[in-house]
Image (cartoon, rainbow, N blue to C red):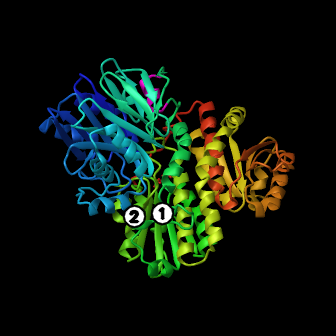
Amino acid sequence: MCGIVGYIGPRNVKDVVIGGLAKLEYRGYDSAGIATLDNDKVSVVKSVGRLSNLEEKLERTPVGGHLGIGHTRWATHGRPSDENAHPHQDCSGRFAIIHNGIIENYLSLREELLAKGHQFKSETDTEVVAHLIEELYNGDLFATMVAVGKRIKGAYALVVMTKDEPDTIIAMRKASPLIIGLGDGENFIASDIPAVLEYTRRVYVLADGEMAVIHRNSVECFTLAGEAVSKDVLEVTWDAVAAERGGYDHFMLKEIHEQPKAIRDTLTGRIAPDYSRVVFGEELSWTPEFVRSVDRIHIVACGTSWHAGLVGKAVIEQLARIPVDVEIASEYRYRNPIQSENTLIVVISQSGETADTLAALRDAKARGRKVLAITNVVGSSAAREADDVLITRAGPEIAVASTKAYTTQLVVLYLLAVYFAQERGLLDDTLIRELLTGMAALPQAADQVLDTAPQLEQFAKDWSKVEDTFFIGRGVDYYLSLEGALKLKEISYIHAEAYAAGELKHGTLALITEGVPVIALVTQTDLYEKTLSNIKEVKARDAFVLGVTFVGDEALAKSVDQVIYLPKTMPLLSPIVTVIPLQLLAYYAAVARGNDVDKPRNLAKSVTVE
Ligand code: F6R
């Protein structure tokens, strides 16, 4: 996710930039760096690790001046290291840039720039932009950045400075956030409002596709094509703590709302522009022979990540026809699992530090298996120790209850399923296109489904006193039921059980009495009638049923008490939109019960003990 800060004005530039970055550390913190313009010279200091490492380095290597930019990194391309930390520079050292996002076409740009003699120092996608600026600079940084904007593809918040224009910083935004803090004889730039609140409450929020030219005494805004735009000043009224949560009451709610962006970021650059195939490029070291040789997959994970694995099983088995076992890490490692030579082990872990998952990873490696890690943290133990890594680009997840990590794990598992199927020649071109265009539409669908929040808030308020709840569904809806029940239990402390809908009558139906809430997920078209019969079974025992189905399904409303309508997606891709109302339900139930939503009792974000 990364944090960005910039400053131009009379204050101590290092203090403003480092202070601002400290407020943004929640956006990522595997390395940090600063560039300042001091006596006609661009000075850059960077350090791997927490911001405190950079601060220590700055004590030994002080920087000064009236203009500076700084960055805390959450790695996506290139491991956390001093070289890969931002700011990045061109060959001459005249320019310094910081970036949040992903430059999708960096490989082709890098080749082009290498051919022109540019020399690269890092493994990042960002560095290409520094060299591109050097290549295109014509004495006018603004015109150069308009030209740069035409060459780069992807998502970015970019901030650039040069010794050749000592009263100018340029900031550009496409799909990654940026705000400009407006001062008197000074101005600020940041990824998020908390970084500037100490100095000003007046900000411009740059819209997608806008850029700003920031001088000490003025700020002008433009489209990325260079046309002037006028902006309204936002007067910030939140306190600093609320601002860190982006104005949301809790990190969990903020993270639920970040899902459309997290899904989009996780897809970025991994689908060919014509939707003909999944491209992992250099992310995977697998040869075509290896991809064809895999005869079984063991997915190993804990908790919510295990639930993501269950959906992964359904999708991989359906599309790639490879048998998949989904294993709870704390069980797997102790039962001497049967692995063939060609079993691929996939560990899923948001943190990449869960002790049981790491133990399973190490055990599999010791047995000579190939291990793929799906994780949200680039420098984590799982990422370092696995043979291959696919990063979920959800950005740091602060709330203990996992939300955006889960949806992005699903995205990676979908991509993996299509990848296996396409490489093994199992899908025709039309179906691949249908799946990939369906996946590309998921961020928008996730955005739409957030509109169900008021209905779920009311439902949660009405039902917050209950002590027992049931979630039912068939196929992937059953796996979603497990996740919905876990989310409700862990933050609202309401007892919840998830059942494969057809299994209720084998015992649990005895617990259904008048008014017991049952959340029934009905998104799988081929299982619709069967699930409806199971709903009738609980309705006949006077349960209160909240049905979850796609928009356009008028029939369900006749069989249940309330319906949540989801935007239409392919049934196979529905888990991404189905889970969001379940997260919102758990969230609002916890709020209604007055619980500490972000830090539920007895739980920790990263479980590093067995
Ligand atoms: C629940 C939750 C946990 C984690 C589990 C594994 O909301 O967050 O169940 O999913 O502790 O953590 P990771 O994915 O970091 O290995």
Which residues make up the magenta segment?
Answer: 238-246
Quick check: 447 left or right of 20?
A: right
Asked if residue 506 can be seen in this view, the reply is no
Image coordinates of residue 260 in percent, x first then y, are: 56, 46
The quadrant of the rendering that contains the N terminus is: top left
Q: Secondary structure at mark 2?
A: helix
**In terms of image quadrants, where is residue 383?**
bottom left
Between 161 and 469, the one lying in front of the other is 161
Residue type for callout 2 = Ala
Q: Residue at x 66, y 44 (%)?
A: 449
Q: Residue at x 43, y 25 (%)?
A: 203
User: Any atom of ligand 1 within 8 Å of the CB at mark 1?
Assistant: no
**10 Å neighbourhood of mark 1: few (<14), some, or many (≥20)?**
many
**10 Å neighbourhood of mark 2: few (<14), some, or many (≥20)?**
some
Tell me if residue 556 comes above or below residue 271 in the rendering: above
| Residue placed under numbered mark 2 in the picture | 359
Q: Residue at x 63, y 49 (%)?
A: 579
**Closer to the N terminus: mark 1 or mark 2?**
1
Quick check: 149 left or right of 551?
A: left
Residue type for callout 1 = Ala
**In terms of image quadrants, where is residue 587?**
top right
| Residue placed under numbered mark 1 in the picture | 329
Image coordinates of residue 89 in percent, x first then y, are: 24, 47
Quick check: 187 left or right of 223?
A: left
Residue 245 on the magenta span: yes
Asked if residue 155 can be seen in this view, the reply is yes
Tell me if residue 464 comes above or below residue 551 in the rendering: above
Asked if marks 1 and 2 touch (Cβ < 8 Å), the reply is yes
C-alpha span from label 1 to label 2: 8 Å
Between 345 and 165, the one lying in front of the other is 165
Q: Secondary structure at mark 1?
A: helix
